[in-house]
C-alpha cells in the first residue's frame, strides 16, 4: 500500500507545472545569470598575478640590470619585465598592457597612468632598490669580489612576496552565491511540503477529501505523500547541484558524494518546514504557498543569497540567527566541505538541520492528526 501511494503521489507532484518551474527550473536560470554577472570576477580582481612593467634604458645601470635579471630567472616572480624604448613603453601603458614604466637614466623613475595595488607594489620595489643601491655601489668599489654576493642579498630582500594560503580550499568569495543558490533550491522544498500537506486535508483539496474518506491508514498515506515530496525535491537539488558543479564548474571541494548528501539534507529540511506550514491552520493553499515562499526567500536573504556579506554581518551582530536559520546551516554544509579538512563543523551543522527537520515533521503530523471535518 505504501509503495502504491508513493508512486501516485510522486506522479501527482511532477505534474504540477508551477511547482516544477520554481523548484527545478528557476535555480538553473538564476545560476546562469549569476555566472554571467560575476562568474569570473574573482580571477580578474582578487587573485594576485604577475605585474607587467615596461623598462626603458636611457642609460645603462649594471646593478639594476642584475637585480631584474635575477627576478626574471626566478620560478615565481611578482613582475614581468618588458624592455622597450620610450615610445613603445608609453603606447603599452596607454593600452593597459603594462601597469607602469620604469625609466633608467641618471635617476630611476616610475611613470603610471593610475593609482592602485599594482602601481603601489612597483613603487615599493623601486623605493627598496634605491635604498639598497648605495650599499651595492660601495661594496663594488671597495671589494669587487663580494659584488655577486651583494646582488644576491639585494635580490633576496626585494623578492619578498610569498604566497601563503590559509587553507587548501576554495577562497573565491563569489562562489558562496552558488552555494546559496543550491540552498535556495533545497529550501524551495517548503512549497512541495505545503503541497504534500494540503493534499491530505479534506477542506483544502478534492484529493484530500477522497483520502480522508478512504479506509487507508492515515499515517501511511501521509508518510507516502511526504516521501514522494522529498524525492521530488531531491531530484530538484540534484539537478541544481549537477548544473553548478559540472556545467558552471564551480569549485565546491573534491568530495562530490558529500556535496550531494548536503543537498539531500537541505531538501529534507525544506520539505519538513513546508509540511508543518501546510498542516497548520485552515488557510487556503494559496496563502500557505505564499507564506512558505516568503519564509524560504527571507531565510536565503539572511544567508547571503542577495547580499554576500549578510551572513558575516549577522554573525557579528546576532549570531544566534545563523545557528537556527536553515538556509545558513545548509550553505554552511557546502562551505565546510570547501574550506575545512575535517568534518567536525560539518557534523554540527548537519545534526542541527536534522533536529530542526524532526521537530517540524513531528509538529506537522500532530497538527494533521487532530483535524476532523463535519462534512466533506
Image (cartoon, grey):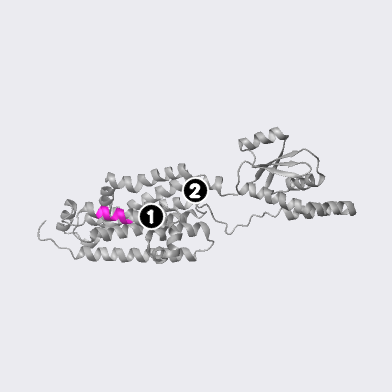
SS type, badge 2: loop
The Cα–Cα distance between marks 1 and 2, rounded to whole angstroms, is 21 Å
* Image quarter of the C terminus: bottom left
Q: Residue at x 26, y 59 (%)?
A: 277
Q: Can you identify the residue that label 2 sits on?
A: 250
Residue 333 percent location from the top left of the image: 45, 59
SS type, badge 1: helix
Q: Residues within 10 Å of mark 1 (few under 14, many from 20)?
A: some
Span shown in magenta = 288-295
Q: Residue at x 87, y 51 (%)?
A: 140
In front: label 1 or label 2 = 1
Is 305 on the left-hand or right-hand side of 11?
A: right
Residue 90 occupies quadrant: top right
Label located before the other in sequence (1 or 2):
2
Q: Is residue 309 above or below residue 351?
A: above
Residue 190 percent location from the top left of the image: 31, 55
* Image quarter of the N terminus: bottom left
Q: Residues within 10 Å of mark 2 (few under 14, many from 20)?
A: many
Marks 1/2 in contact by CB < 8 Å: the verdict is no
Q: Residue at x 41, y 63 (%)?
A: 322
Is 230 on the left-hand or right-hand side of 242?
A: left
| Depth check, front residue: 35 or 375 | 35
Point out which mark residue 301 bears. 1
Task: Decide whether residue 293 is among the magenta residues.
Answer: yes
Point out which mark residue 222 bears. none
Residue 269 percent location from the top left of the image: 35, 59
Does residue 14 appear anywhere in the picture?
no
Amino acid at each position: 500500500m505504501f509503495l502504491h501511494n508513493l508512486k501516485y503521489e510522486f506522479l501527482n507532484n511532477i505534474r504540477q507545472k508551477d511547482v516544477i518551474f520554481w523548484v527545478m527550473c528557476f535555480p538553473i536560470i538564476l545560476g546562469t545569470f549569476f555566472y554571467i554577472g560575476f562568474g569570473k570576477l574573482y580571477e580578474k580582481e582578487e587573485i594576485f598575478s604577475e605585474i607587467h612593467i615596461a623598462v626603458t634604458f636611457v642609460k645603462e645601470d649594471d646593478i639594476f640590470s642584475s637585480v631584474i635579471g635575477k627576478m626574471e630567472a626566478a620560478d615565481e616572480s611578482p613582475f614581468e619585465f618588458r624592455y622597450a624604448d620610450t615610445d613603445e613603453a608609453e603606447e603599452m601603458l596607454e593600452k593597459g598592457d603594462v601597469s607602469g614604466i620604469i625609466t633608467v637614466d641618471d635617476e630611476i623613475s616610475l611613470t603610471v597612468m593610475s593609482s592602485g595595488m599594482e602601481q603601489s607594489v612597483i613603487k615599493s620595489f623601486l623605493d627598496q632598490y634605491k635604498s639598497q643601491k648605495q650599499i651595492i655601489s660601495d661594496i663594488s668599489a671597495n671589494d669587487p669580489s663580494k659584488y655577486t654576493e651583494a646582488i644576491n642579498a639585494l635580490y633576496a630582500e626585494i623578492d619578498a612576496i610569498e604566497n601563503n594560503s590559509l587553507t587548501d580550499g576554495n577562497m573565491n568569495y563569489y562562489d558562496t552565491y552558488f552555494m546559496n543558490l543550491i540552498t535556495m533550491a533545497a529550501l524551495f522544498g517548503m512549497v512541495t511540503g505545503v503541497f504534500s500537506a494540503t493534499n491530505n486535508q479534506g477542506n483544502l483539496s478534492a484529493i484530500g477529501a477522497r483520502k480522508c474518506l478512504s479506509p487507508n491508514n492515515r499515517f501511511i498515506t501521509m508518510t507516502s505523500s511526504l516521501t514522494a515530496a522529498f524525492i521530488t525535491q531531491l531530484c530538484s537539488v540534484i539537478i541544481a547541484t549537477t548544473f553548478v558543479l559540472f556545467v558552471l564548474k564551480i569549485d565546491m571541494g573534491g568530495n562530490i558524494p558529500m556535496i550531494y548528501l548536503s543537498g539531500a539534507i537541505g531538501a529534507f529540511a525544506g520539505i519538513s518546514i513546508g509540511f508543518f506550514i501546510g498542516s497548520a491552520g485552515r488557510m487556503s493553499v494559496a496563502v500557505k504557498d505564499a507564506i512558505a515562499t516568503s519564509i524560504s526567500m527571507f531565510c536565503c536573504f539572511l544567508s547571503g543569497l542577495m547580499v554576500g556579506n549578510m551572513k558575516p554581518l549577522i554573525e557579528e551582530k546576532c549570531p544566534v540567527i545563523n545557528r537556527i536559520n536553515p538556509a545558513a546551516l545548509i550553505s554552511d554544509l557546502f562551505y565546510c566541505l570547501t574550506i575545512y579538512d575535517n568534518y567536525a563543523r560539518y557534523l554540527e551543522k548537519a545534526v542541527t538541520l536534522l533536529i530542526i527537520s524532526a521537530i517540524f515533521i513531528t509538529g506537522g503530523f500532530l497538527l494533521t492528526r487532530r483535524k476532523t471535518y463535519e462534512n466533506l
